[in-house]
Image: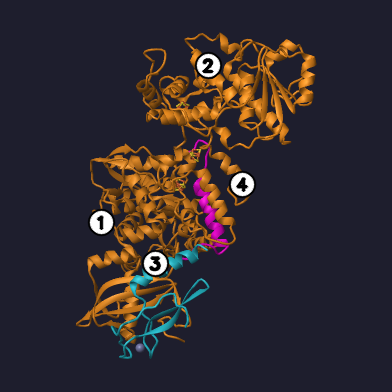
């Protein structure tokens, strides 16, 4: 099993308005300044739209962004 | 100019003299830390004080009693009262401070095998012997008299108590020095000593007895005879402190000689020297010396005296600059950190944040007695970061996008006055005046186009200062060229600027410019400025800190309008930056807030500025501040526009000017959706630097594509869109077809192999 930097389960709470189906925990790769990080985030199984919760965006993601910028 | 080279760094480091010792320490031949001593005694910590004395002096009881205190003549306290009586304080420390139990300097020194003979046990010889013993050598001390001490034995009891003399002389035995008294050394015996010992020191007095004719090098006390070192101070009339210093110098030389090290290297600052420290005393209230009731200080008297020490240090630049204070160190250290930051190849660039938080305002250069310019260092470092691709992308992204907006279709414009084909003048309001007070710009344009002959054109745009502050020189040139082309297109008119930064930028770029206040002082006040009154404290602009005539004009115009002018402590060439300069306000909120607070904390009075950014910065923290043009054009108070409004204002200004002044048939683009944002949500978006226009784009996209995520439990939607280098997220509900915006956030990371909306390609 792959090592994920983060793994978030939608718990059936999120629905894709376009496709009308619930989001599932799926792999997505986040990238910044030439570095990439495989994570598991809620996605639409059909159109592959991704959901990034605010906690993640302003927490871990922001911290990683900052440290990559100062590299 | 500062360059990122070792050589340039050293030159700049030398400008900051804050780490020079205080005047007392530099003058003391033993460099006793008088400032530290006073700090300890002030707090009643005599034991710490005693430790300090013992750290620098091998005969602490004796020297505290007999030292001639040359430090006295250099003490800065003299400029406000009398010099601090350090010698009395040293005595108090030796009396009231507790003796250290273990671990004198000797405890950690490895014993050495070399042997040294010291001839003469006066002050100099005693110090040489003890200093060498401290360094681990086997020392034999030879004295012709029956007991050691030399001239010290003649000091009256009242000045040097026999008990104190005894305490220090005991150290000879305690440190394992072999003492031979009643032994006069003649020339022949000296030869024996030289043969027997690895080095020999002969005090000046003992040397005289031998009537030996030798040459002594003053700097090292080495003689022209191998292994032989000799005292240099005159036996009669010399001072005890000079003897002590001589003894220490000889010990250092002998140690170096025996360790086969250079005797001359780095000895310039041994002994007394003049400190280059700068300490201001104008503000210090005069205080006379505390005289002891008896011969010596009581503890309370000593504390009182120590309190008079002004703790000499240089705080000229730090007192003025909140940014410099933020990082708790000094420019000299900052310079090195900046240099290291630019030269590391691998690892974290820890000083990026600092480099990008300076306002580049040049105040420090004015305040520093040596002209140290931290702004220059930070600017050069930023340019270097940009050139090497090491500038963190997020740092100036927002500001640079804003500049692109100003010089893009939404705002940029260059036209002659309607009905004319020439412009003798062109009004250049700049990006932020248009963003903050568009009505004022319209009013000024109307006024000038009526009162000035020869045509008043209009150029809307940004002068490029933002690129300059961001360290992007190529971009600055590109923006300046855009303005220059517009200026040429209008026939090279004189630019009338409303912003001191634009004014300064055009002067640098050789584009003729005048600041509006200068023009109005020639032209007369506009009709709208009624007679007013009150006191206004002038906050000068940092970009024009040396422009006396502009500063005078602002004051004169405000006085003409009926105001009384108050001068702030930091005014004119010494003025603070408001925090907008250097893009500090976009980069570092902590420094920005501290900067604003120190500006507005200078006076209770309302402020007057001639830069819209100063006005907006101060008003954002509740300080009543008026721009000179608000006064002169009789404008009502307008609140500070948030980041979204600042864009909308620029768009509207261009639109309204085109429509009303030129009669163009234009319409403002309307959003394709209906939406609503409550005030507290607006504030949240403003703080997260999310523009209303970003929100509209996301919602329009969501509306068109139905790319929305519904959260069942929270009963709301999420949508996102990548705009530029940022993915923005908005939370919303939909009621009767109206999007109710609830919250926004963003991140810069992107989804790999996804299109802009997050779908996999
Ligand atoms: S003013 Fe600042 S930069 Fe200048 S010597 Fe003093 S501490 Fe150093
Ligand atoms: S005021 Fe204090 S630190 Fe300054 S020279 Fe005098 S004793 Fe030394
Ligand atoms: S903000 Fe101004 S005074 Fe402070 S370090 Fe920067 S240039 Fe110097
Ligand atoms: Zn879908």
**Looking at this rendering, what residue extends furthest in the left direction?**
B736
- What segment is highlighted magenta in the picture? B368-393
- Is residue B293 found left or right of B363 in the rendered image? left
| Cβ at disc 1 under 8 Å from ligand 3 | no
In the picture of the structure, the residue carrying the numbered disc 1 is B638
Q: Mark 3, mark 2: which one is toward the viewer?
A: 2
The numbered dot on residue B165 is 2
Q: Are marks 2 and 1 in contact (CB under 8 Å)?
A: no
Which shade of the palette goes to chain B? orange
Q: Chain of mark 1?
A: B
Q: Earlier in the sequence, mark 1 or mark 4?
A: 4
Which residue does the image show at 61% across and 23% down from the upper left? B127
In the picture of the structure, the residue carrying the numbered disc 4 is B8
Give the chain coloured cyan.
Answer: A
The numbered dot on residue B434 is none
In the picture of the structure, the residue carrying the numbered disc 3 is B411
């Amino acid at each position: 099993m792959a090592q994920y930097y983060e793994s978030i389960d939608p718990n059936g709470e999120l629905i894709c308005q376009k496709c009308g189906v619930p989001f599932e925990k799926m792999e997505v790769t986040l990238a910044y300044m030439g570095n990439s990080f495989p994570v598991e985030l809620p996605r639409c199984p059909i159109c592959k739209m991704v959901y990034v919760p605010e906690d993640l965006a302003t927490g871990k993601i922001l911290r990683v962004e900052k440290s990559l910028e100062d590299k | 100019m500062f360059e990122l080279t070792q050589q340039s760094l050293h030159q700049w480091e030398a400008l900051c003299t804050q780490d020079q010792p205080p005047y007392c320490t530099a003058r003391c031949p033993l460099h006793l830390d008088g400032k530290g001593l006073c700090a300890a005694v002030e707090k009643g910590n005599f034991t710490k004080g005693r430790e300090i004395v013992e750290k620098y002096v091998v005969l602490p009881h004796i020297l505290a009693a007999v030292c001639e205190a040359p430090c006295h003549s250099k003490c800065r306290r003299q400029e406000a009262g009398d010099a601090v009586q350090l010698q009395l304080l040293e005595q108090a420390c030796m009396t009231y401070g507790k003796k250290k139990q273990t671990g004198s300097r000797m405890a950690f020194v490895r014993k050495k095998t070399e042997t040294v003979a010291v001839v003469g046990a006066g002050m100099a010889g005693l110090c040489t012997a003890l200093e060498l013993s401290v360094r681990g050598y086997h020392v034999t001390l030879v004295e012709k008299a029956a007991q050691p001490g030399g001239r010290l034995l003649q000091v009256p009891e009242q000045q040097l108590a026999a008990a104190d003399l005894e305490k220090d002389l005991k150290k000879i035995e305690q440190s394992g020095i072999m003492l031979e008294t009643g032994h006069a050394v003649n020339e022949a015996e000296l030869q024996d000593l030289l043969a027997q010992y690895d080095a020999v020191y002969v005090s000046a007095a003992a040397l005289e007895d031998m009537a030996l004719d030798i040459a002594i090098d003053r700097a090292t006390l080495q003689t022209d005879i191998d292994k032989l070192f000799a005292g240099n101070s005159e036996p009669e009339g010399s001072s005890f402190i000079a003897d002590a210093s001589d003894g220490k110098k000889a010990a250092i030389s002998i140690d170096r000689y025996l360790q086969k090290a250079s005797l001359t290297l780095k000895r310039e600052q041994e002994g007394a020297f003049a400190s280059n420290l700068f300490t201001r005393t104008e503000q210090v209230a005069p205080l006379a010396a505390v005289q002891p009731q008896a011969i010596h200080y009581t503890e309370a008297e000593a504390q009182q005296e120590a309190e008079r020490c002004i703790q000499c240090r240089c705080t000229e630049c730090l007192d003025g600059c909140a940014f410099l204070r933020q990082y708790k160190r000094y420019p000299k250290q900052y310079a090195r950190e900046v240099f290291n930051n630019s030269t590391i190849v691998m690892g974290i660039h820890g000083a990026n944040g600092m480099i990008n938080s300076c306002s580049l305002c040049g105040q420090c250069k004015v305040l520093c007695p040596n002209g140290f310019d931290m702004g220059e260092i930070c600017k050069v470092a930023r340019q270097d970061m940009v050139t090497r691709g090491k500038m963190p992308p997020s740092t100036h992204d927002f500001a640079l996008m804003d500049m692109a907006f100003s010089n893009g279709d939404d705002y940029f414009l260059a036209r002659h006055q309607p009905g004319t084909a020439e412009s003798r003048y062109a009004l250049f309001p700049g990006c932020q005046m248009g963003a903050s007070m568009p009505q004022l710009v319209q009013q000024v344009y109307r006024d000038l186009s009526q009162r000035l002959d020869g045509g008043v054109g209009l150029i809307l745009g940004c002068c490029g200062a933002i690129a300059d502050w961001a360290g992007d020189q190529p971009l600055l040139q590109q923006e300046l060229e855009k303005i220059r082309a517009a200026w040429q297109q209008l026939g090279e008119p004189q630019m009338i600027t409303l912003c001191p930064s634009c004014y300064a930028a055009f002067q640098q770029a050789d584009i003729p410019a005048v600041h509006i206040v200068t023009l109005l002082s020639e032209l007369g006040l506009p009709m709208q400025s009624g007679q007013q009154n009150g006191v206004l404290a002038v906050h000068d602009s940092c970009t024009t800190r040396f422009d006396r005539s502009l500063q005078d004009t602002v004051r004169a115009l405000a006085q003409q309008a009926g105001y009384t002018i108050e001068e702030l402590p930091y005014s004119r060439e010494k003025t603070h930056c408001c925090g907008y300069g250097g893009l500090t306000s976009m980069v570092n909120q902590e420094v920005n807030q501290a900067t604003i607070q120190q500006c507005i904390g200078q006076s209770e009075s309302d402020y007057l500025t001639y830069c819209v950014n100063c006005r907006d910065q101060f008003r954002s923290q509740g300080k009543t501040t008026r721009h000179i043009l608000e006064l002169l054009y009789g404008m009502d108070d307008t609140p500070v526009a948030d980041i979204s409004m600042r864009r909308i204002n620029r768009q509207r200004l261009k639109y309204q000017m085109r429509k009303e002044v030129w009669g163009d048939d234009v319409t403002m683009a309307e959003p394709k959706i209906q939406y609503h944002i409550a005030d507290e949500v607006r504030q949240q978006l403003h703080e997260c630097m999310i523009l209303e226009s970003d929100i509209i784009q996301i919602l329009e996209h969501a509306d068109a594509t139905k790319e929305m995520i519904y959260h069942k439990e929270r009963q709301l939607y999420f949508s996102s869109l990548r705009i530029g280098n940022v993915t923005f997220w908005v939370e919303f509900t939909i009621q009767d077809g109206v999007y109710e915006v609830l919250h926004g956030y963003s991140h810069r990371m992107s989804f790999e192999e996804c299109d802009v909306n997050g779908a996999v390609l």
